[in-house]
Amino acid sequence: MKKIVLASGNKGKLKEFNEMFASFNLEVVAQSEFSVPEVEETGTTFVENAIIKARHAAAITGLPAIADDSGLEVDILEGAPGIYSARYAGVGAKDTDNWQKLLAALDGKTERSARFQCVLVYMRHAKDPTPVIAQASWEGQIGVEAKGDNGHGYDPIFIAEGGELTAAEMSSEAKNAVSHRGKALELLLEAFKAKGII
């Protein structure tokens, strides 16, 4: 089984990756298992930050690396929280702190369109000059209250376009089929097949 290091310690993301890759003889291992420290995300875009994270994990572990940089863009907030989604309420903020701050920012507003963005970067090694990049989005809107306890991040307040359930009320299977990360993973798998990685 081929090992790929995930440039994240996020258990929710790790679970999603392993569910998607299970049938391809790929095992995704969290960088925390190799004592890889977090790297500062100094990029100004999801793509830049994902490359920084993948290169850092590959350099320290010597393994191929996948990094995910994702976040929520809210139109009326000019794309915020965007690349700062994980630390919207401050460095070290919990998921609940972040989405509570967002609900407060949207209080009384009727325009609540938003989308999740996901950029995945795969690097064969730290000096890979041609990383594989897959990007996808998931359109929806921000609800007025949190609902559901399946998922992570902003899932309890994000309602997918055309639906009534929040992402946190959906089953993992239903979410993976339509989510930004699920779609980006499908694109990444297609690229892996085209390049003979799987």
Image (cartoon, helix red, strand yellow):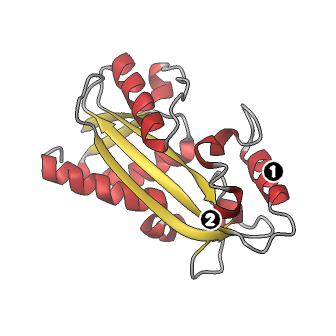
SS category of the residue bearing label 1: helix
Residue 97 rendering spot, x and y as whole percentages: 79, 46
**Neighbour class for label 2 at 10 Å: few (<14), some, many (≥20)?**
many
The residue beneath circle 1 is 101
Disc 2, disc 1: CB below 8 Å?
Answer: no
Q: CA distance from mark 2 to mark 1?
A: 15 Å
Q: Is residue 56 left or right of residue 2?
A: right
- Residue 149 visible, this angle: no
- Residue 137 visible, this angle: yes
Which residue lies at the image location 51% right of the left edge and 55% below the top edge?
A: 117
Q: Is residue 167 above or below residue 47?
A: below
Which residue lies at the image location 59% right of the left edge and 71% below the top edge?
A: 140
Q: Image quarter for residue 10? A: top right
Residue 35 rendering spot, x and y as whole percentages: 49, 19
User: The disc labelled 2 sits on which kind of residue?
Assistant: Ala
Q: Is residue 107 above or below residue 68?
A: below
Q: Is residue 91 left or right of residue 58?
A: right
Tell me the tag on residue 114: 2
